[in-house]
Image (cartoon, coloured by chain):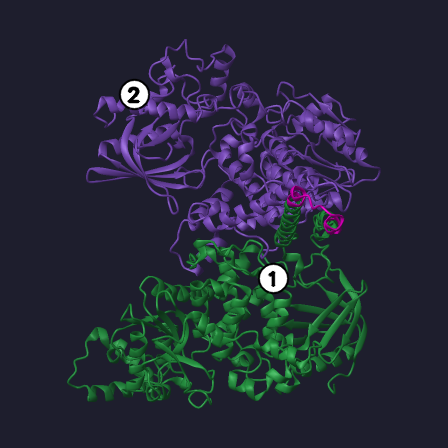
Amino acid sequence: MEHIRTTKVEQVKLLDRFSTSNKALTGTLYLTATHLLFIDSHQKETWILHHHIASVEKLALTTSGCPLVIQCKNFRIVHFIVPRERDCHDIYNSLLQLSKQAKYEDLYAFSYNPKQNDSERLRGWQLIDLAEEYKRMGVPNSNWQLSDANREYKICETYPRELYVPRIASKPIIVGSSKFRSKGRFPVLSYYHREKEAAVCRCSQPLSGFSARCLEDEHLLQAISKANPVNRYMYVMDTRPKHRMQSWWATQKDIGRIIVRISSKIWNDEKIRESHEQKRLNAMANRAAGKGYENEDNYSNIRFQFVGIENIHVMRSSLQKLLEVNGTKGLSVNDFYSGLESSGWLRHIKAVMDAAIFLTKAIMIENASVLVHCSDGWDRTSQVCSLGSLLLDSFYRTIRGFMVLIEKDWISFGHKFSERCGHLDSDPKEVSPVFTQFLECVWHLTEQFPQAFEFNEAFLLQIHEHIYSCQFGNFLGNCQKEREELKLKEKTYSLWPFLLDDQKKYLNPLYSPKSQAVAVLEPNTVSFNFKFWRNMYHQFDRTLHPRQSVFNIIMNMNEQNKQLENDIKDLESKIKQHKNKQTDGVLTKELLHSVRPESPTLKTSLCFKEQTLLPVNDALRTIEGSNPADNRWS
Amino acid sequence: MMFFFLFSVSGNASNPEFKKKKNSECLLRLRHEGLLNSCPAGVASCPASSCPFRSPRSPRLKLLESALLLGPRPTAGGMEFSELIRTGRAQAELLRGPGAPPLRGTLCVTGHHLLLSPGPQATSDLWLLLLRSVDSIEKRVAGDSGTITLRCKDLRVLQLDIEGVEATLDIARSIEALSSLESVITSFPFFYRPKGLRLGDAWHFHPPEHYYKRVARETNAWRLSEVNEDFSVCPSYPRAVIVPRAVDDDALARSARFRQGGRFPMLSYHHAPSGTVLLRSSQPLTGPQKRRCAEDEELLRAVLAGARPGARGFIVDTRSAQAAKQARMTGGGTEAKAAYPGWKRLHRPMERGRPLQESFVRLVEACGDLEQSMDRWLSRLEGCRWLAHVKEALSTACLAAQGMEREGACILVHGAEGTDSTLLVTSLAQLILDPLSRTMTGFQELVEREWIQAGHPFQLRCAHSAFSHARPKHEAPTFLLFLDCVWQLGRQFPLSLEFGEGLLLALFEHAYASPFGTFLCNSEKERCLCEVRTRTHSLWSGLNQPKEQRKLRNPLYVLNPLAIWPSVEPQSLRLWQGLFLRWTRPPEPSEAAWEKVWQIVTDKEKTEGSQPTVSASEPQP
């Protein structure tokens, strides 16, 4: 509260950044402890959560006032003009303070109160049960078991307490392997394919060092491949691009040179062939730094596969470029496409998708288990494992299943939500749209397979909204241990029950769960299947959207159909009842009465039909006539 | 007269019995497809006098042929096709791209078609390709077999693997010769007699008189003039045109002399809610001397006077100011400001002609490459500039529509000839403003009135599509650009168009190659001379058959009485995948989804329909 100097400013103008006319809405700006609120002259409200604010900018004073541009993490950009510079300055300073909190306890989730009692809150948190989920997958079983090695977070702080490992992997092996892996993130089960008996496992990169090897790690990988009774070899997918590793090596050239000298000493009897030299040098340079990838010689029955997904810094600047291009007013078609190309965003999305497809094929076609890792195993690994599971298992394509998937591969395995989303005022270099990319990949799948998903685009957008909102506890913190220390389950609420309550809004009317064609998704990743996701990156720029929604109308029709069918069934059963009664000759007055009060259902459904004609209002939005006050996409 | 030389050259089948059986089977199938008229004798040998489908050789027509250069003059006995067919049959395998299984069978070349008849045990039907739709052909021989790649005008790519080198070369040469015939009256529409349709049907669906009736109901300021009855005033206009009541036919004729190709300003659309009008014409022939024409000026003055007192007008020139000025050197030009009080000129440069065709060719090229990287694809999408043309067209149409609806101004649109980008703008503006033109019949009427009867030279523009190696002369995908813009409108207003993507795709196909006569020739005059109306079937009657409706209609349509203003930001425009990637991507998922939408909608109708019967059978207490 101490940051708020001005709580109310009148005569503020709100500009629409894409409108062709320069009309602005005039209204009053309020500053509350959690939100910035703008109420225009039509009493339309625009709420902006402080946590959503990514940056605030005060532009040079103009004749009409002082412009204030606020960019949000959900890609909303608002442009206010505040009449007096003093007010503008006060708001600017307050927002700077309010949008960057130093402590978790100051985040909205800790004060948000949806009027639930403690047991309701607890039930909300218990809605998604991962132990239940592993049971659904079919573990534990004869090959896989629950390990208690990390029960006290002693082996790996960023993993959950409950981990599934091959039954033949003993505790010393696990402990040994974890010492060999970056941040102790040893290989564990992420998804088990019951039918193929193949597993998707995840870990971080090995600290293979210069010439070191780790027998326990090698054993653990052997155990994973042995846990697959069908196929003896397994894949290790390194999701990092090979050229990155090489360019990283280039910066470490000096170390490299030293290594060459030492190495020729150590293996002086070994003849390094010309063609192999470069490869060896790279690997050695990585190992010299104590990081890198597994030495293929030490792991038998393993096939190594690199898939090129770039790191978080590349992704961050790629998104930044994309947003810069899109924000341009009066953008030409050519500038748009050249900007889209140079940002590289769609290329990165395709890379993630390709990796997931590789994983799916390894399991479905070759019946092989797959171990996925990147550097720390919480960004790219989460993307690939979760997307792969989504392709493999139709359960994750339901509303509840998608929640489970996010809980499993993202939240529990320690994707650093707070750092990646910039929840607190911390290192900006740790911020990266890794999860946004995952959502975008899912959206691309919904576009290619319109009938395979129970949920619609609005569901993805809503989740994206809350990744940043800090309104619910799910995404706070960077790992389960941290979340427990914060006592999130006692102090905050879970997002999922709220989404489930609103389920109707997120349903895909075309969903056909029984269709065999979509049991395992095989997306086509030719370049032209990747499109700019306008509804995400311009979700608040209504003028750019289609003016009528097919989804709503189909949804309504679907509901009407169901209702009418039920009515028919009702009536038919009643007719039957009647006929029976009549033949029995026991038609009594009471029975007739029991029928009659029901008939109004018929009438209501007919009225219903008339009401749900076309939402004509939708069409009222015109080239510049879109109602800017109504700027919440839903 | 023989037009089908199915079996003029003996094929590979050695067994005469089998051959005979095969022949009759083929015939049956052909008849079923409506390709054989009712004259099976025409296949084998048919005396010229007895064939009901011989071309009536009226003296008038003969004159015309020489006047219109309608292609090679038929030789005695009408042997022109047989000379071009080098071999009739061969064994071949057809590869139809992803999603469709390959087809094996006997390949035949006929006067108008390529047929593949699968073996007797095969269950699948005869496969048939209109030779006119072949855009380019490529042959390769290896060993004792050959491969022909056919690229079609509807952007399909087909591959034929043929047994025998000689047969391959002969078939390739035959296809090459037959697909590039320029004669109109020997083209397939003149022989196509489908079952269930009658000649002359639907040709009278959309005459100018029909539209005038609507205008006359709305305003009294316009009349239907028959000044062009014999096409002498303007060869590219229809017989009847709608003009201001205050201007007489003589003045029109003078104005026509002042406009390129005689295309004087005529009514394109009357917007009843604002009482304003949309006109189109060609450029005025001001020339370097800045000539003026009193009748032309009077005509435009009468337009403003007829709208409402004090009404303003905008002239939307689809060329840049500089290009318009340059046109003066070649006798063209643009309206001088002083000569047309009340009218203001706006320049909205739009791409046309060869650059547009090149843009189309490059886009199709890019869409055919499945292996390219993301960056390459995006840079090619940018480089071809197709979506930039879509944006230009839509925003110019919005400008015209906005002028009428918001500012109450009259709009005159023209470029140079007034037969390409002009029509693009006027037709799109109507679609934006007029709810009636968004219905199934309304849209067909719009295409008929604003494209076909308005004299868009389809024959020239659509002679070749994107695959042709020939240097483009008059080809330009202006009509395709229009269809693309309509598709964009349909995406942004998915409930407001009564027709779906299916109709747009059908129009694209038929504009380039069609068994129907609707898109033949370049103007009403030529169609009249070729007797297209009496001797070919109309596409509209073909499309309006009940069995076609499910493909063409938008199940979600609800009348939207308002103007539909599209967003023209690049983020809102999309590549029309249904057209450009139609043959390269597996269509199943989206088609299944579409089926589902239909199912939901028809379910709704069904349940609603059945409800009254249930409630009626409810026993009365």
C-beta proximity under 8 Å, tags 2 and 1:
no
What residue range appears in magenta? A579-597
Q: Chain for mark 2? A: B
Q: Does residue A366 appear anywhere in the picture? A: yes
- SS for dot 1: helix
Judging by the rendered image, the residue that carries numbered circle 2 is: B8
Residue at point 64%, 86% (across, down): A105
User: Does residue A593 belong to the magenta stretch?
Assistant: yes
Q: In this view, does B609 lie above or below A263?
A: above
Taken as a whole, is the magenta stretch helix, strand or loop? helix
Q: Within 10 angstroms of label 1, few (less than 14), some, or many (20 or more) residues? A: many
Q: Chain for mark 1? A: A
Judging by the rendered image, the residue that carries numbered circle 1 is: A506
x and y percentages locating residue B22 in the rendered image: 30, 25
Question: Color used for chain A?
Answer: green
What is the tally of numbered marks visible in this picture?
2
**Foreground: B3 or B502?**
B502
Chain that is purple in the image: B
The extreme top residue here reads: B49
